[in-house]
Image (cartoon, rainbow, N blue to C red):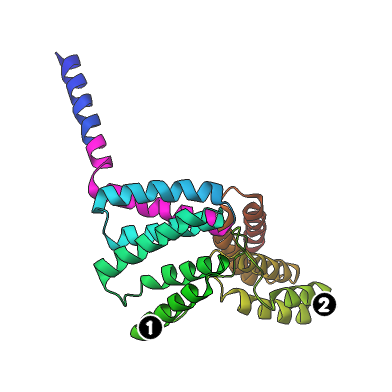
Amino acid sequence: MLGWLWIIFSIFAAALVLWAWNSKAVKLLRAVRLENRGVRHTLQGRVDRGEPLLRTSLRLAEEAEGPNNANVGMITANLAQACYFSGKTSESEQLYKRAISIIENSQGKTHEYLLPALGNYATLLESLDRKAEADALRVRKAEVEQANPDIQPTSQGTYTSDGLVLEPPGWREHIDAALAAENASDAEDELLSALKIAEEQEAADPHLGETLHLLGELYFQQHHFMKAADFFERAVSVRELAFGAENSVTESSRIMLAKVKNKIK
């Protein structure tokens, strides 16, 4: 009798877990997580990994909130960008049109959510030699920006058409000067200048991670272990976002952080 009760309980528990996993809230949570991973892979040049994640994210968001929700519009815009990077310009354009339409209908024609879609769609049109249409979209983007004066423009880095991150202007000069410096003081000044430039990029920009790691190494060599630990900790966080926790680049910062912590003990 107890055996049968246990079987019935197990079936009920499994059904409950399955229901919860497919519930609206859980689907939306899964969609957001997959979207974040998909965007990260796309912007780091791993479009082949990012695009499928974004497609799954879009499907889950549509199932959770319907096809005309603002979140669906944002994910659609991110998928459009992934398609653009992978050369699927026709699909990318259709997705951008859909994203803009969803956001306008759900949030209004001057909502801040429109800014990425308008800007990236304009870039796509320009790449197709449709400059007049691209210029019209940039005018629309400027109107949305004027309607949202509290939104501070932020740089998300500059990317090539295949999704590879370009170096921030002026960053390389400071890095090269730091590596060639004859004393630690000059190297520190150059690295801090490079850091200021890198911090203007997105949180997962690999140049930010590299600069933080180099500063950590500099302070480690000077036996400024507390400072070094702070920079290595930041480098690990940035590189995990940029490359993943298991990447060898991330691991190099993690190893140095462990060495510094041993010195502090």
Disc assigned to residue 181: 2
From the top left corner, tell me how far across and down residue 190 is, in percent. Answer: 73, 80
Q: Specify few, some or many for label 1: CA neighbours under 10 Å numbering under 14, 14-19, or 20 or more.
A: some
Q: Secondary structure at mark 2?
A: loop
Q: Say whether residue 42 is magenta.
A: yes
Residue 32, quarter of the rendered image: bottom left
From the top left corner, tell me how far across and down residue 76 is, in percent. Answer: 38, 57
Number of the front mark, 1 or 2:
1
Q: Residue at x 23, y 44 (%)?
A: 23
| Residue 155 relative to residue 196: left or right | left
Q: Amino acid at mark 1?
A: Glu
Please name whichever residue, 43 or 240, is drawn nearer the observer in this view of the structure.
Answer: 43
Q: Specify few, some or many for label 2: CA neighbours under 10 Å numbering under 14, 14-19, or 20 or more.
A: some
From the top left corner, tell me how far across and down residue 88 is, in percent. Answer: 52, 53
Q: Which residues are magenta?
A: 17-44
Residue under label 1, please give it: 143
- The CA distance from mark 1 to mark 2 is 47 Å
| Residue 5 relative to residue 247: left or right | left
